[in-house]
Amino acid sequence: MASSNEYFIGLALIVLMVYFPATSSATKYIVGDDSGWTIKFDYQAWASNKEFHVGDELSHSVLKVNGTGFKECIKPPVSEALTTGMDVITLSTPGRKWYICGVGQHCEVGGQKLFITVLPEISGPAAAPSPVSSGHAVASTWFQISVATFLATVMVLII
């Protein structure tokens, strides 16, 4: 029969696995946040306070282009265009990435384009709260910290 110490240690491990599952550090960004993907919006300012990493996702109907396509607003072939309005692009490699709008003169006249630098994937269990649901993520993080503190206290008292 297991001792009470072994029972509590096993219970603590189960609780830790339930409340601290292995999570991806990916962040989901809606391009332009509340303003969305629109003309006459400063997407470089929007991106300036964000760090984009491999595995992160961009949501909105953007066209991925190269540096020349970005500078000159050259649309990619129709077969490469995203068209649902809320397409999701997973940033799969580090480096410079360029996106434009393919509607009418939105890129050329409206400045509807985005340039970002994607950094390598973040490793480790700590994930930044998603800007899409940051309130829930913060509440969840505080709950997890509270549970971990309680379990650590119990473990010290038992051992």
Image (spheres, helix red, strand yellow):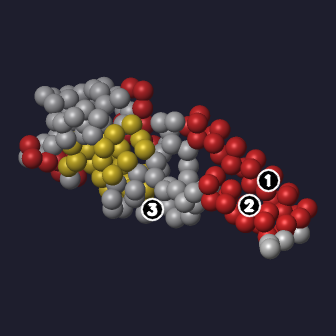
Q: Which residue is mark 3?
A: 121
Q: The N terminus appears in which quarter of the rendering?
A: bottom right
**Pointer 3: residues within 10 angstroms few (<14), some, or many (20+)?**
some
* Sooner in the amino-acid sequence: mark 3 or mark 1: 3
* Sooner in the amino-acid sequence: mark 2 or mark 3: 2
In this view, the residue in front, 8 or 107, is 8
Q: Nearer the viewer, mark 3 or mark 1?
A: 1
Q: Amino acid at mark 2?
A: Ala
Q: Amino acid at mark 1?
A: Thr
Q: Residue at x 38, y 33 (%)?
A: 32
Q: Which residue is mark 2?
A: 12
Q: Residue at x 85, y 66 (%)?
A: 4
Q: Is residue 116 above or below residue 157?
A: above
Q: Residue furthest front?
A: 1
Disc ID at residue 27: none
| Whether residue 82 is visible | yes
Q: Is residue 13 left or right of residue 82?
A: right
**Pointer 1: residues within 10 angstroms few (<14), some, or many (20+)?**
few
Give the Cα distance between marks 2 and 3. Answer: 30 Å
Which element type, helix, strand or loop, lies under badge 1?
helix
In this view, the residue in front, 18 or 5, is 5
Q: Residue at x 74, y 54 (%)?
A: 148
- Residue 75 place in picture, x, y as percent: 13, 42
Q: Which residue is mark 1?
A: 149
- Residue 104 place in picture, x, y as percent: 13, 28
Q: The C terminus appears in which quarter of the rendering?
A: bottom right
Q: Amino acid at mark 3?
A: Glu
